[in-house]
Image (cartoon, rainbow, N blue to C red):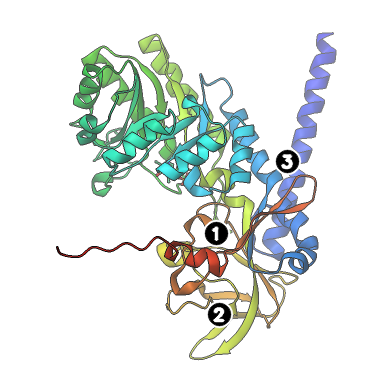
Amino acid sequence: MQGFFDTCRILTFMLILAKEFKYLDILKKQKGGITMPMSADFQKRLEPILPEIIKCFGTPFHIYDERGIRQTGKRLKKAFKGVRGFKEFFAVKANPNLVLLKMMAEMGFGFDCSSIPELQIARQLGAQEKDVMFTSNNTSEEEFWQALKYGSCILNLDDISMIPKVPMWPKRICFRYNPGKRRTGNSIIGNPVEAKYGVTHEQIVKAYRLAKERGARKFGLHTMVASNELNYKYMVETVRMLSRVAEMVQNKLGIRFEFWNMGGGIGIPYRPEQEPVPIELLANEIKKILALFKAKNSYVPKLFMECGRYITGPHGVLVTTVINRMSKYREYVGVDACMSSLMRPALYDAHHTITILGKDDSDEQEVVDVVGSLCENNDKFAKQRKLPKTKEGDILIIHETGAHGLAMCFNYNGRLWPKELLLREDGIVELIRRAQTVADYLATQSFEPQIWELK
Ligand SMILES: *Cc1c(COP(=O)(O)O)cnc(C)c1O
């Protein structure tokens, strides 16, 4: 019998290996032919149907991949299986589309909210107290009132001065910790002294003491020291740092931590040469830290995480049509989307891979700026980028727009938000947000007249 099981195990292992090799093969082919960080699988399913989707919906639009999002969610949960109380709180700000957020709830994720409207969204989706983290910063007293009114949530306080501003002190409280200079004896975590977030190292014990005095009985410890970080060791060091701060606080105050929240910030490869974060390796390293903490303290807090980008980022693209080819001092590809639909390149000088439907690296190349229609010279999706030669009517696919894409839309120049589509697991493409209309744009200028005059 044992022999039979061993044979099965070996066969399964071989099957996994074969699958891995096939996957590597796809990747290799991609790197040779066309440079694409977007998932090979999404590309393979999207490109053949894209012309028909465009015929139906018109460009521009963001389109998301349900299968990819669910696979990433599954993979994350699997990697952290066995970690006590592990829970991902999806950062709503990364992609606040209700259909996607519903998917998050279905996967058992909670929500990390940074504002009252985001809390209302979470509430609308039926999230309970334990499913919602309210991580705001520079929060007003009014917002705390509303946060507690709009339903229970876990309050994550971003500053020691906010302690007296919290009305109706909850039983459960969390503080966001900002280490200032690195505290792990490891040079990996940088120097967040300039970050506006969190309670400082010197304030942290006092913060929990004050919370305890006000009746808090359940304690969480949160931090977020990295953003779009591809080096998984950053996150490992983050958890190590949390374990040390927790020990310091509990030794001084005799409290136990119900949970740690390691924040979001796991990066995704925006550039073809970048590698995705090895999430299983990350989880295994974190498990070691938790085991060590348990051995020393005879308990271990639950582990929370609040990634946005990692979950949806790679599973969305912005599809746009070339409407003008212009030759000035540079060559310009003018498209029908602009930075109001994807602000990251202009705001962070972020790189987003661009591919052209039906063309690849083997086609004739040229160096261009890809531009939108805003009266802003930083309205460029790419600067001096080598791309296959394009003409009017060609379709551009701008990659990795599943997080912090439409979420950051704005209306400058009267440019309206594009629509959002979902490529569902069953192959059907569904409109999940319509494009903005002029009426939407003008909506806030329709109101009851109101004046003030000096009496
Ligand atoms: C922005 C943010 C996140 C999500 O960041 P990602 O890069 O999308 O993972 C999570 N938590 C907090 C507090 C944030 O500010």
Label 2 secondary element: strand
Residue 268 in the figure: left or right of residue 259: right
* Disc 1 packing (10 Å; few <14; some 14–19; many ≥20): some
In the image, the residue with mark 1 has its CB under 8 Å from the nearest atom of ligand 1: no
Q: Position of residue 181 (x, y in %)?
A: 24, 40
Label 3 secondary element: helix
Label at residue 3: none
Image quadrant in which the N terminus is located? top right
The mark nearer the N terminus, 1 or 3, is 3
* Disc 2 packing (10 Å; few <14; some 14–19; many ≥20): many
Amino acid type of disc 3?
Glu
**Residue at x 29%, y 14% (from the top left corner):** 255
Discs 1/3, front: 1
- Name the residue carrying label 2: 368
- Name the residue carrying label 1: 271
Q: Position of residue 289 (x, y in %)?
A: 43, 23
Residue 316 in the figure: left or right of residue 49: left
Q: Nearer the viewer, residue 27 or 104?
A: 104
